[in-house]
Amino acid sequence: MLVSLDIRDFGLIDHQSIEFGPGLNVLTGETGAGKSILVEALQVALGGRAWSEYIRTGREKARVTAVFALEGLAALKERLAAWGVLPEDDGLLIMSRELSRSGRNLCRLNGQPVPLSLYREVGSSLVDIHGQHENQSLFSPEKHRDLLDRFGGLWPLREEVAALYRHWRSISAELEEWQRGTQEKARRMDMLSYQIKEIDRACLVPGEEEELARERQRLANAEKIAFLAGRCYAVLYGGSGGAPPVVDLLGGVRRDLEELARLDGEVATLLAAAENALYQVEDLARELSRYREGVEHNPLRLQQVEERLARIKELKRKYGSTVEEILRYREEAAAELEALSTGEERVAALGSELRLCREEWEEKARALSQARRQAAAVLEREVMRHLGDLEMEKAAFRVLLEELDQPSAAGRERVEFLISPNPGEPLRPLAKFISGGELSRVMLAIRAILAGVDELPTLVFDEVDTGLGGKALVAVGEKLAEIASRRQVICITHAAQVASLAETHWRISKVVREGQTLARLEKLDEGGRLAELARMLSGQEEDFLAREHARHLLNLARRKNS
């Protein structure tokens, strides 16, 4: 339940802390005193829409903080734990929201910043707010279906129906996409097949392009290569320009060093170096000879290499910047072609899956329809009973179930509440044949019923008794008290008959301080309640007859509660 609401710099409130109790809490005050501020602040604290206009004049920020006790809300506790939000040591949940004129909103759960979507989801699990404008929701058949399903405990079954419907639509969309793209897929398959064949005919090998480039370099310069290799060989082994070969010169050096080594042993290392140099020059000469003999001036081979490189260049232009990328594209194209080739199989599989999903949806939707018919009969009896308590015992209430033309995520039918306020009048939709006061009582009857099945611990009623008087007004007060025996109820009212039944009574008033208008909330004691009820009855707190009437109302309320 809602333990307290702390409001700072919100509307006409500079700072106010309000403590609520179990059962029926009422808020009263003069017309225009600002009773709606409390509801607006609570809506913001729960994650409702927030406007910069809510911030008190002269302030940059506003903050509202709602504290909740979580007894009996095991499912919400589990969700909070899954989100990483742990209750306070005393089991309380603190919802705090800060507004700023810059438009920045800061939401906290137990001091931990959270996204507004999560914050709002938590708030919707704790409080339900009803007022004259919320009554308009009873005009919507979509809301009627929701109310019936909540009353009948049908939401889990409805979610199964919705999940099957979404799966069915997903399969249908995929099947349509496959069928719609048949021609396009055929063109794509032809193109992929051509590309794969073109690449395969080229018989590409990784690293081939680099090797061909080197071969082209050799073939294009064969004559020059042969000349240079031959001249080097001649210098090393055959002599050049009348000069003896390098091999012969090194041979002479070695012989002289051998003679020198016999005369001086320290020259032995030089002799070894000369011998190594001779052997290396001989090896170099032999390699040059073989290299020169391998150089071939082959115009035909050069042409073949040029053509091969041109072919690779053309494939690179189409499929990738390297041979490796071309081959990778070929594998990807082959995989896509294989996937497209199985399209007919996929279409057949989707068709079978679609039929199976449709059958499952039909089965679950039939079960939901049957459960709705049963729940509707019970709801009709319950609403009629509560309407009798609310001085509408001659009204007739029916739940109309009409089959839809098309399947939907919510099942096979639409649901609409019909009412005949008076005998002899036909049953008609609520939106077409009901007054504001009657609509408030129908809403209250439905809320009284749902209070027994919903987990919401707190219900807020904002002037739902507007337009009522006499026995109907007394009945509404008693119905609110009845709901308050099972749920915490917060009620904003102008009616003394309703306010007299409160277990906790707050009064709001306006004061002017230092040239500024402020709203003030005061928790009333017994004497304060008596004065306030007298004011509500006659407009004057000191009116003797009004005070006696107020005392009578309080005594009646005590007897009813005892």
Image (cartoon, rainbow, N blue to C red):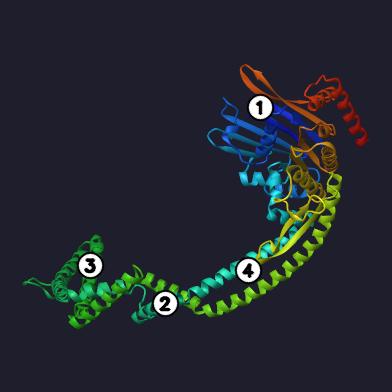
Marks 4 and 3, how far apart in space?
86 Å
Q: Earlier in the sequence, mark 2 or mark 4?
A: 4
Q: Which amino acid type corresponds to the residue marked 4 in the rendered image?
A: Trp
Above or below 484: residue 185: below
Q: Nearer the viewer, residue 326 or 20?
A: 20
Mark 1 or 2: in front is 1
Q: Earlier in the sequence, mark 1 or mark 2?
A: 1
Q: Quick check: can you spot residue 169?
A: yes
Q: Is residue 1 left or right of residue 251?
A: right
| Mark 1 surroundings within 10 Å by alpha-carbon count, few (fewer than 14), some (14 through 19), many (20 or more) | many
Mark 3 or 2: in front is 2
Q: Which amino acid type corresponds to the residue marked 1 in the rendered image?
A: Ile
For residue 277, which numbered disc appears in the image?
A: 3
Q: Nearer the viewer, residue 261 or 539?
A: 539
| Mark 2 surroundings within 10 Å by alpha-carbon count, few (fewer than 14), some (14 through 19), many (20 or more) | few
Q: Earlier in the sequence, mark 1 or mark 3?
A: 1
Mark 1 or 3: in front is 1
Q: Which amino acid type corresponds to the residue marked 2 in the rendered image?
A: Arg
Q: Position of residue 432 (x, y in %)?
A: 70, 51
Q: Residue at x 72, y 67 (%)?
A: 365
Q: Is residue 420 left or right of residue 100?
A: right
Q: Which amino acid type corresponds to the residue marked 3 in the rendered image?
A: Ala
**Element assignment for label 3:** helix
Above or below 440: residue 237: below
Marks 1 and 3, how far apart in space?
104 Å
